[in-house]
Amino acid sequence: MNSIQVRNNRLNTLSCIVALLASLLMPVVTQAADWLRWRNVGAATFTWGPFTLYHARLLSPDGRYHGLSSDLALVITYQRAISHTDLVDATRDQWQELGILQATPQSTMWLQALEQLWPDVTPGSQLAFVATQHQGQFWYRAGSATPFSPLGPQQPSLFSERFLAIWLDPRTAYPNLRQQLTGEKP
């Protein structure tokens, strides 16, 4: 092979690698754009004492709540700074209250993974959980001027349902919040 052929082979290889990487990233961008266009099901504000902790919105493709196993996006906009450790502790407490912690052996492993995955949140930052086709994905954005970025790997359907149960299970500790998110009258 002469030097021109070698250079062309390298360029072809590099072009293939770039195309492959682009194709791997494309579904993530498309997926974010898809759920961001979903319709609002309901919205609620969570307060603790005199403090507003977050505003939450529930989205679905048709703007209706069809149960925990349907396509849903829960978008939380934080109003206070909260450490990732406190977020995980709150998740643990809610799973404990719902009986998920005791009934789902892998919940301890899930909590450890969330400890590594979630960032500390600040006022205006958003954490979203999007469940589509029986899998879930966390998304994060530091503020409204930045785009959402995926956090970690896709989650299996069991995790997705257990995570969304904190807000949407009929046995939730916050029934008024659930009613507002699902579009029911509180």
Image (spheres, rainbow, N blue to C red):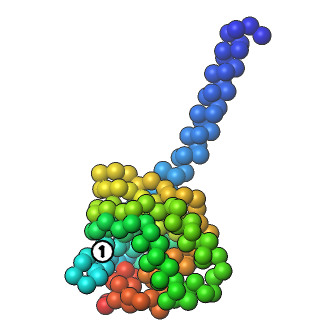
- Residue shown at 32% from the left, 76% from the top: 43
The residue where tag 1 is placed is 53
Residue 131 lies, with reference to residue 5, above or below; the image says: below
Residue 120: x %, y % from top left: 39, 62
Type of amino acid under label 1: Leu
**Residue 174 seen in the current view:** yes
- In percent of width and height, residue 16 lies at 64, 32
Residue positioned 70% across, 8% down in the render: 3
Which residue lies most toward the right here?
Answer: 1
Q: Residue at x 57, y 85 (%)?
A: 100
- x and y percentages locating residue 94 in the rendered image: 47, 83
**Badge 1 local density, few (<14 within 10 Å), some, or many (20+)?**
some
Q: Residue furthest left?
A: 50
Looking at the image, residue 68 lies above or below residue 145:
below
Q: Between 15 and 107, which is closer to the camera in this rendering?
A: 107
Q: Quadrant of the N terminus?
A: top right
Q: Is residue 47 left or right of residue 87?
A: left
Q: Residue at x 26, y 76 (%)?
A: 52
The quadrant of the rendering that contains the C terminus is bottom left
Where's residue 163, x and y in %?
A: 51, 76
Q: Would you say 56 lies left or right of 161 here?
A: left
Q: In this rendering, is residue 35 above or below 63?
A: above
Q: Secondary structure at mark 1?
A: strand
Q: How many marks?
A: 1
Side (left or right) of 2 relative to 64: right
Pick whichever, 74 or 26, lies toward us.
74
Picture quadrant where residue 46 is located: bottom left
On screen, residue 101 versus residue 139, left or right, reads: right
